[in-house]
Image: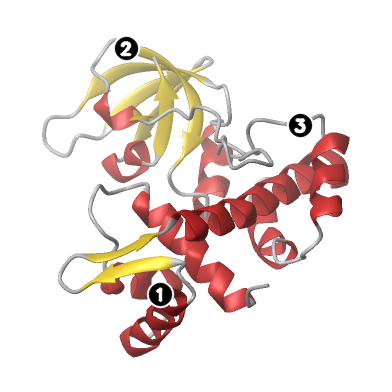
């Protein structure tokens, strides 16, 4: 059994590890969790004592196999609950993250297995994030960002690097969701903003927005 705080740290380290080949810095953890650096250092020591992380000064922290297994279990619960809330309880995709943050800490293997079975064993959550299976295996996830494509390219939206409520509401206004077809009409050389076509609409997106959209081309 692990505390809710320990699980939150493990999940945060897991997410940050996906964005780097190096160790995760205490400063990046502090920023992501909105926690003081001293508190982060103290928690890392606790996790290291439980063999959940390896920490090396000037290199950062990485999950051990045990730590990764536990982090994936929390991620699995979080994404299954998000799927349940959207598909079965009619939540909007921008409403589910905070609720799933609470539900992910319920410790019942049977509940998670029955939830997965009830949903038809989905591979992806409503935001396109892959759902680990019971053994911690992850389905393939799109990693190409919309900002990496060139003028004239066509792509299909497959996920998002930012699943905050504000960004998802912004995407709703633009008519962009999972599996939305996108055509890149123009890229501004000055700021790399894009004019794209979604259905019959032409939309302008900032570089910040296109960096947060994952696609398959």
For the image shown, how many numbered marks are present on the structure? 3
Q: Residue at x 36, y 70 (%)?
A: 29
Q: Residue furthest left?
A: 190
Q: Which mark is residue 48?
A: 1
In the picture, measured across the screen, residue 53 lies left or right of residue 169, that is left
Residue 204 seen: yes
Front residue of this view, candidates 69 and 125: 69
Looking at the image, is 77 positioned above or below residue 151? below
Q: Position of residue 150 (x, y in %)?
A: 23, 18
Front residue of this view, candidates 111 and 79: 111
Q: Which residue is mark 2?
A: 153
Q: Which mark is residue 92?
A: none
Q: Residues within 10 Å of mark 2 (few under 14, many from 20)?
A: some
Q: Residue at x 61, y 40 (%)?
A: 132
Q: Residue at x 86, y 51 (%)?
A: 110
Q: CA distance from mark 2 to mark 3?
A: 33 Å
Front residue of this view, candidates 116 and 79: 116
In the picture, measured across the screen, residue 45 lies left or right of residue 27, that is right
Q: Which residue is mark 3?
A: 121
């Amino acid at each position: 059994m692990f505390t809710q705080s320990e699980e939150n740290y493990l999940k945060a380290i897991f997410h940050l590890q996906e964005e780097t080949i190096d160790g995760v810095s205490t400063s990046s953890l502090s920023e992501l969790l909105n926690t003081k650096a001293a508190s982060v250092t103290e928690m890392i020591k606790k996790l290291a004592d439980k063999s959940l992380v390896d920490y090396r000064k000037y290199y950062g922290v990485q999950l051990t196999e045990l730590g990764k297994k536990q982090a994936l279990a929390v991620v699995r619960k979080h994404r299954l609950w998000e799927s349940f809330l959207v598909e079965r309880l009619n939540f909007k995709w921008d409403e589910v993250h905070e609720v799933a943050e609470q539900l992910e800490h319920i410790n019942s293997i049977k509940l998670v297995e029955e939830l997965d079975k009830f949903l038809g064993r989905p591979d992806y959550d409503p935001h396109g994030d892959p759902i680990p299976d019971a053994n911690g295996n992850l389905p393939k996830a799109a990693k190409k960002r919309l900002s990496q494509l060139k003028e004239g390219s066509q792509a299909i939206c497959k996920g998002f690097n930012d699943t905050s409520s504000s960004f998802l509401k912004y995407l709703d206004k633009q008519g962009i969701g999972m599996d939305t077809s996108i055509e890149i009409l123009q890229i501004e050389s000055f700021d790399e903003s894009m004019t794209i076509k979604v259905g019959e609409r032409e939309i302008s997106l900032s570089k910040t927005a296109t960096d947060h959209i994952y696609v398959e081309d």
